[in-house]
Image (tube, rainbow, N blue to C red):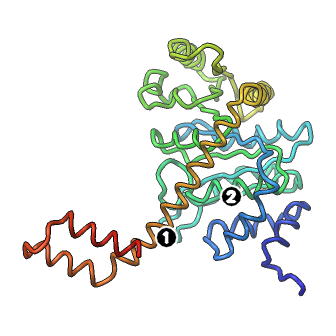
Amino acid sequence: MKKGPEDPTDLVARARAGEARAVARLVSMVEDGSPQLREVMAALVPHAGHAHVVGITGSPGVGKSTTTNALVTELRKPRRRVGVLAVDPSSPFSGGALLGDRVRMQDHATDPGVYIRSMASRGHLGGLSWTTPQALRVLDAAGCDVVVVETVGVGQSEVEIAGLADTTVVLMAPGAGDGIQAAKAGILEIGDVYAVNKADRDGAEQVRRELRSAIALGDRPEGAWKPPVVMTVAQSGRGLDELARELDRHRAWLEETGELLRRRTRRAREEIEAIAVAALRTRWEDVSSHDGLDALAEAVVAGAKDPYAAADELVATAGS
């Protein structure tokens, strides 16, 4: 029987052949929670696990989109295929992404070696969409050598990117808060590479000194990676070659030390847990919407049951 256009195996084969429309369709299936998502993931897994996942994070206004755009240019020089997932704030009206990042990356719109996708955060805390791990797998399996994930920039909760990326780049800029404030926000705990963007502005050297001092004070075991601090001016492309070199250097360190496997195993564990919790939540909603919960609540109010006994009974119902 001829495979239809929505057949997951066919879509994955077309995506791996470089068909952008097939990649877009697979990401849309992920975002929409398609009933075929299980089949899609099963078809993707044998082809994934090769891409270097780079997360770019930082406070709003430090130039994440401009830096991502310039970094893609640098990463393409050795003819690497690059994917970009730009997680935008959700529209309060439609729930969709505002697409601002994709508009700012028009330099690469006609490059077949670059795939850019804006994803809506849909109110998810942590600066990422909950579907980002699955979308990453799509781009990885589609043959991207590097996948850059740019987060929305929501401050302290944005540290979630560290659990998703192989290498996390933290952007800072003069005038956006000093190194002490960054340390308070916990952002110094997640970076593998730090970039002081807008380095042509007053105060950039001070930010670099504060960052280096804070990093030096960190308690790191022997042989641990020491995050470098790179000075960049993304608008002109200055320093982006050095940033790309530091990304490659960190990837090599990850592989040599076994840290890459540890990080990816931790990421897979968290993804499995998230899928399992979502499935349990769906089952729980089915049970809790049943009349039996109201009856148990009434029994507790009447003094016929204690809340623990009522909860045990409800859990037993959910498991049956």
Q: Residue at x 68, y 22 (%)?
A: 231
Between 94 and 292, the one lying in front of the other is 292
Residue 36 horizontal/vertical position (percent): 68, 75
Q: Which residue is mark 2?
A: 135
Q: Residue at x 80, y 45 (%)?
A: 50
> Quarter-wise, where is residue 164 in the image?
top right
Q: Is residue 294 above or below residue 61?
A: below
Residue 306 horizontal/vertical position (percent): 14, 66
Q: Residue at x 65, y 23 (%)?
A: 199
Question: Dot 2: what SS?
Answer: helix
Pick whichever of labels 1 and 2 is earlier in the sequence.
1
Real-space CA distance between mark 1 and mark 2, rounded to the nearest whole angstrom: 23 Å
Q: Which residue is mark 1?
A: 93
Residue 114 horizontal/vertical position (percent): 83, 51
Mark 2 surroundings: few (<14), some (14-19) or many (≥20) residues within 10 A:
many
Q: Is residue 191 visible?
A: yes
Between 97 and 272, the one lying in front of the other is 272
Tag 1: residue type?
Phe
- Tell me whether circle 1 and circle 2 mark residues in contact (CB < 8 Å): no
Q: Residue furthest left?
A: 303
Tag 2: residue type?
Ala
Is label 1 or label 2 in front? 2
Left or right placement of residue 295 versus residue 258 in this view: left
Q: Residue at x 58, y 53 (%)?
A: 271
Position of the N terminus, as image quadrant, is bottom right
Q: Is residue 238 visible?
A: no
